[in-house]
Amino acid sequence: MPSPSDFDTANSIEARKYTRTYGLTPPGVDTFAKQEQRCLALLNARKTPIEKYQYLSVLRNTNVHLFYRLLANNVKELTPLIYTPTVGEACQRWSELFTHAEGLYLSYEDRGHLHSVIQNWPHDVEMTVVTDGSRILGLGDLGINGMGIPVGKLSLYTACAGIHPMRTLPLCLDLGTSNKAFREDPLYLGSRRDKVTAEEEKEFLDEMMAALTERWPGIVIQYEDFKNPFPSLERYQNTYTMFNDDIQGTGAVILGGFINAVKQSGVAPKDQRAVFLGAGSAGVGVAKQLTEFFMKEGLSEDEAKKRFWLVDSQGLVTSDRPGKLADHKVYFARDDNDGKQYKSLEEVVEYVKPTILMGLSTIGGAFTPKILTRMAEMNDRPVIFPLSNPSSKSECTFEDAIKYTNAKCLFASGSPFPTLQWQGKDLSPGQGNNVYVFPGIGLGAILSGAVSVTQNMIYASAEALSTSLLPEETAQNWLYPDIARIRDVSVIVARGVIRAAQKDRVDRELALRNISDEEIDEYIRHRMYDPYTEHEKVDEQLRELAQLVGGPTSSHAGSATTTHGAVRNGNPSDVVGKER
Ligand code: NAD
């Protein structure tokens, strides 16, 4: 049976004969340029983002290499269509719009038999993204409609880090849903039970983790969009090759930009003063990650921790403020406030005179013009990171940050902002987009054969990201590299991750330990799936085949068929579909 990509109009005549699709596609052999022109015209003919999403989804399923060539060439333009924000609507309407199956669903009713359901997946897997659909983006519990997330995210793993599409497994758990509207929706494709309990989910995940790893011992498992992501991370991070992008990837990408901001600010780590608006799980988590950076820069844990002032809805987090402090805030609570309490961000800014302002508060516009102006008065290069999502909740816009700091700030946001024209120059905002790190973390974990993903590997991904900027990018005060170079960035991130795995002795590919960084980079590139060379590979295989059967592959359909048949009978898996 030919595979869908055997019908690619860029396949050579030889390849068509070999795959027995000769005559089944139009006779012309396309170049990629012509295919791209056609695809983009078809894409642009679709009016709404969801229609474009559907077109791209069909393309991925019918001509996977073309899809990835198109994506590689247009990564900036197409990423918002295959992932956020469009994937949000795709998930909300997944059951309504469903046309073709993608990925694997494991239902609570399958417990006890997950191993055999997993056997149904027809390919070998290196990377899976798994969700239970319980907190999809900011959209709440979407049950099995959450499948759009693993599908989209794995497309990014392939496009950005060259993980082979056939080696990826989108995985959605059907553990019921608390979404009553979906349970009552006749078109909803998941089970209609209420969401299982945390204990039931834990037992299910135990079985799933064991079954996945039993079938594919090298598999890397990335958790995504679980309502409560912490228990599974704690439970599995030392026993399986897994990580959670919401927690670890997010922390790493913010850290990567932060390292560059600190460097470019010209202020030594020991003199930095970071005010965080927002002391929720994200604020405290990010602050802890940045503490690690200050410690690596030579500060003691206590000195590092003292670089942070956290502010929540009640004001500065201090150990002596009235009322009980939530447990997670205690670590950063200030005890040097001489009994004074500071209620508003403005008061805190005057008191602390920060060099860094981070926003994880969900309060849109909380970095007021007055606060931004003060930051610029107090600092040559104030670091301004409004990280709350979506854009409406961002603590300030890129435009305001530039305007009120007179373009002095080093800026990165959680949500995207457009490029800004400022005094005749185009200024681009940094965006702490997880896509800078998770593909490289996955690739590094796969290639090193890591038995677990350690905290040092996550930290290394951030550090590597911070080193990935070109001199011309740093010269423009960018904190993150150009996303168009993401495959190069992923090589650097993967190398950092591999080296950290080696240091932590969790690697199984021991041969990589003794080779230089240049050789590792070359090895990583060599292992990356490249949608442009897939045709060359087919032609290469054909040449090898021709030699094997003692003659050139035929120039006419009939004898090509004979060649095809002869070799297929010999060793099918070596020839057909292996890397295709
Ligand atoms: P959360 O609800 O747990 O925490 C919000 C915090 O903000 C709390 O400490 C709360 O007291 C504080 N807050 C609320 N109103 C305030 C006010 N008026 N003044 C001062 N503080 C106030 O939320 P979370 O999970 O910690 O996430 C916070 C935000 O961070 C979200 O918008 C999320 O999208 C964003 N986030 C962004 C990234 C990223 O990569 N950019 C990563 C993680 C989270």
Image: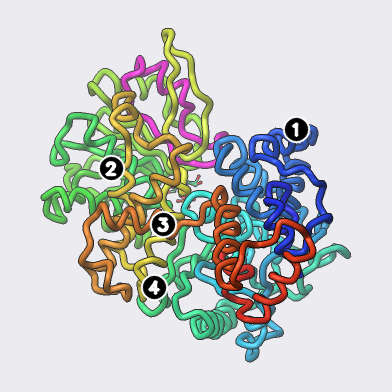
Kindly give the residue lying farthest to the top in the view shown. 424
- Any part of residue 141 in sight: yes
- The residue at which mark 3 appears reads as 526
- The residue at which mark 4 appears reads as 237
State the SS at label 1.
helix
Mark nearest the camera among 1 and 3 is: 3
The magenta stretch spans residue 406: yes
Question: In the rendered image, which quarter contains the N terminus?
Answer: bottom right
State the SS at label 3.
helix
Which of the two labelled residues, at mark 3 and mark 2, occupies the earlier sequence position?
2
Q: CA distance from mark 1 to mark 3?
A: 33 Å
| Residue drawn 56% across the image and 77% down it | 198
User: What amino acid is labelled 1 in the image?
Assistant: Ala
Kindly give the residue lying farthest to the front in the view shown. 551
Residue placed most toward the observer, 271 or 9: 9
Q: Residues within 10 Å of mark 2 (few under 14, many from 20)?
A: some
Which of the two labelled residues, at mark 1 and mark 2, occupies the earlier sequence position?
1
User: What amino acid is labelled 2 in the image?
Assistant: Thr
Residue placed most toward the observer, 419 or 399: 419
Do tag 1 and tag 2 residues touch (Cβ < 8 Å)? no
The magenta stretch spans residue 328: no
Q: Which residues are magenta?
A: 386-412
- Any part of residue 61 in sight: no
Left or right, residue 267 beside residue 314: left
Which of the two labelled residues, at mark 2 and mark 4, occupies the earlier sequence position?
4
Q: CA distance from mark 4 to mark 1?
A: 45 Å
Q: CA distance from mark 2 to mark 4?
A: 26 Å
